[in-house]
């Protein structure tokens, strides 16, 4: 009786869960995204660190002129394989306003490892003024903030096309995967934007994969650790379920046999 009830209970739980997932996907999906597979997909997926480091290079050389990473500190780059000295050198290339000093004045100093990535604009009004009234979004959590996360970001960056005749191009640029298909941001990557420091051949798809991997890491820096912990918890729960079931069988065996 207990085993049948337990199996039925699990069946209901998983049915409700998968129904919720399918409804959530169908509610947010109005077009097919590119079916791209990333190294971090799946239960045992991990970040491709060389790809993420190339993505950081793209961010610094292309994206950082408009977009910030205000929730990421330079020292967080240790999880991508950077040494403390490398991180110190990267941070020192930027200046940050600090203070006040002993005279009550603000001053500029080189950024250090504990500082967060420097925003390209001093404030939101400057960001709007420099971009025709629309402030570019911060990219720290962009993957987490979008339906389909990494696949959406990849598809968006690969989705710039020539504007069809029936679209008004005055308000932006045509993108196959952006809601409404007109986006204010011009195409940021073309395939020859960076010369990779590690010697990787640069192409549009390679650049988009790399920057998407990096932005997925900025949104989910704990992803790998979370997956490892989740697997351990799953194994523990399976073990405890088996142990409890065997205990149940042993405890109630005399009752079923009629010996007590």
Image (tube, rainbow, N blue to C red):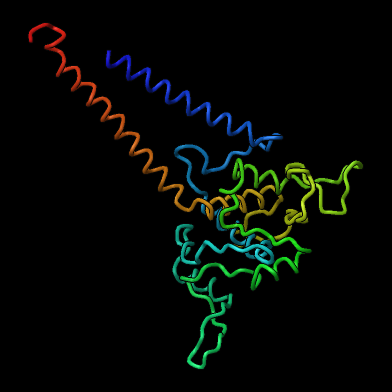
Residue 75 vs 41, above or below: the answer is below
The image position of residue 201, as x and y in percent, is 67, 53
Query: Residue at left 58%, top 75%?
Result: 93
Query: Residue at left 63%, top 39%?
Result: 36
Relative depth, front residue between 41 and 149: 149
Q: Residue furthest right?
A: 165
Task: Write down the quadrant of residue 120 in the picture.
Answer: bottom right
Relative depth, front residue between 184 and 255: 255
For this view, does 77 lie left or right of residue 160?
A: left
Task: Write down the quadrant of residue 180 in the picture.
Answer: top right
User: In this figure, what is the number of numbered marks?
Assistant: 0
The image position of residue 60, as x and y in percent, is 63, 65
Relative depth, front residue between 241 and 101: 101
- Quarter occupied by the N terminus: top left
Q: Residue furthest bottom?
A: 103
Query: Residue at left 41%, top 20%?
Result: 11
Residue 176 vs 66, above or below: the answer is above
The image position of residue 19, as x and y in percent, is 53, 26
- Quarter occupied by the C terminus: top left
Query: Residue at left 51%, top 43%?
Result: 40
Task: Write down the quadrant of residue 25 in the picture.
Answer: top right
For this view, does 78 lie left or right of residue 210?
A: left
Q: Residue furthest top?
A: 258
The image position of residue 84, as x and y in percent, is 44, 69
For this view, does 152 lie left or right of residue 115?
A: right
């Amino acid at each position: 009786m207990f085993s049948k009830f337990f199996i039925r209970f699990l069946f209901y739980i998983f049915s409700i869960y998968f129904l919720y997932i399918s409804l959530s996907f169908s509610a947010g999906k109005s077009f097919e995204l590119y079916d791209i597979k990333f190294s971090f997909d799946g239960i045992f997926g991990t970040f491709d660190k060389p790809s993420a480091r190339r993505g950081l290079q793209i961010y610094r050389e292309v994206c950082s002129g408009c977009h910030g990473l205000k929730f990421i500190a330079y020292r967080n780059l240790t999880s991508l394989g950077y040494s403390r000295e490398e991180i110190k050198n990267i941070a020192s290339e930027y200046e940050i306003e600090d203070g006040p000093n002993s005279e009550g004045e603000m001053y500029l100093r080189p950024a250090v490892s504990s500082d967060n990535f420097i925003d390209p604009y001093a404030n939101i009004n400057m960001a709007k003024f420099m971009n025709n009234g629309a402030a570019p979004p911060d990219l720290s959590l962009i993957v987490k903030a979008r339906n389909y996360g990494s696949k959406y970001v990849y598809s968006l960056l690969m989705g710039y096309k020539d504007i069809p005749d029936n679209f008004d191009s005055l308000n932006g640029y045509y993108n196959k995967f952006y809601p409404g298909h007109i986006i204010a941001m011009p195409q940021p990557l073309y395939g020859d934007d960076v010369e990779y420091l590690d010697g990787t051949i640069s192409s549009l798809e390679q650049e988009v994969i790399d920057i998407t991997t990096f932005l997925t890491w900025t949104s989910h820096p704990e992803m790998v650790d979370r997956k490892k912990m989740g697997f351990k918890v799953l194994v523990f729960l399976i073990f405890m379920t088996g142990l409890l079931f065997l205990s149940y069988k042993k405890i109630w065996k005399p009752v079923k046999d009629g010996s007590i």
